[in-house]
């Protein structure tokens, strides 16, 4: 009887561990992207980033959002069009792993391009990439230390 119960528990655990998480669930699960999750919800982008993808997201941490003065961040969160433009500027179509990153201009989902530099570490515009290759079932997340703003 104990073997049957143990086998059942292991089977259930294996089922849950095999289920991959999308980009949103992966970011939320990391615990340091609560402001990003709030912004994605305010912009109506949750369903998009839970979609098929693949997407590469350069995700600013809560500390990155904290660099923005509170009044400016509050205003941004209330301006859906501008917020959507800022957030989609952090997303690239396709799954780009760290090993595939090259210096140069990269077109974003927003439509504009940001600049990637690789000398002395990877930077995206003025943001430093602090962690890479956080894999989700619909893409990959690279963590950045600053919110990047389209020009």
Image (cartoon, helix red, strand yellow):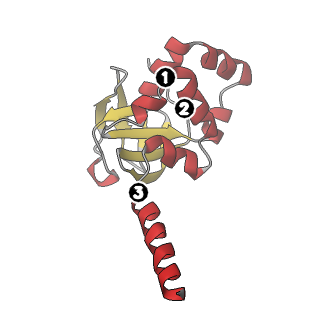
Q: Secondary structure at mark 2?
A: loop
Q: Which mark lies nearer to you, 1 or 3? A: 3
> Relative to residue 124, is residue 70 depicted above or below?
above
Q: Residues within 10 Å of mark 3 (few under 14, many from 20)?
A: few
Q: Which mark lies nearer to you, 2 or 3? A: 3
- Left or right: 32 in relation to 151: right
Q: Are marks 2 and 1 in contact (CB under 8 Å)?
A: yes
Q: Which mark is residue 147?
A: 2
Residue 97: x and y in percent read 32, 50
Disc on the earlier residue, 2 or 1: 1
Q: Secondary structure at mark 3?
A: loop
Q: Secondary structure at mark 1?
A: helix
Q: Pointer 3: what residue?
A: 19
- Left or right: 113 in relation to 21: left
Is residue 69 or residue 52 the one in the foreground? 52
> Relative to residue 69, is residue 123 depicted above or below?
below
What distance separates the C-alpha of mark 2 from that of mark 3?
30 Å
Q: Are marks 2 and 3 in contact (CB under 8 Å)?
A: no
Q: Pointer 1: what residue?
A: 86
What distance separates the C-alpha of mark 1 from that of mark 3?
30 Å
Residue 116 sits in quarter: top left
In the rendered image, the quadrant that contains the C terminus is top left
Disc on the earlier residue, 2 or 3: 3
Residue 51: x and y in percent read 36, 35
- Left or right: 73 in relation to 144: right
């Amino acid at each position: 009887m104990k073997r049957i119960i143990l086998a059942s528990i292991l089977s259930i655990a294996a089922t849950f561990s095999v289920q991959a998480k999308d980009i949103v669930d992966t970011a939320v699960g990391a615990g340091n992207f609560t402001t990003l999750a709030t912004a994605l919800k305010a912009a109506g982008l949750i369903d998009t980033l839970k979609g098929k993808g693949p997407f590469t997201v350069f995700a600013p941490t809560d500390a990155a959002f904290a660099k923005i003065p509170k009044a400016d961040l509050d205003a941004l969160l209330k301006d859906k069009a501008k917020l959507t433009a800022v957030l989609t500027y952090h997303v690239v179509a396709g799954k780009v792993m760290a090993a595939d990153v090259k210096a140069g201009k990269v077109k974003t989902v927003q439509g504009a391009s940001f600049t990637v530099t690789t000398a002395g570490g990877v930077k995206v515009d003025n943001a430093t990439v602090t962690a890479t290759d956080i894999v989700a079932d619909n893409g990959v997340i690279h963590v950045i230390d600053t919110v990047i703003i389209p020009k």
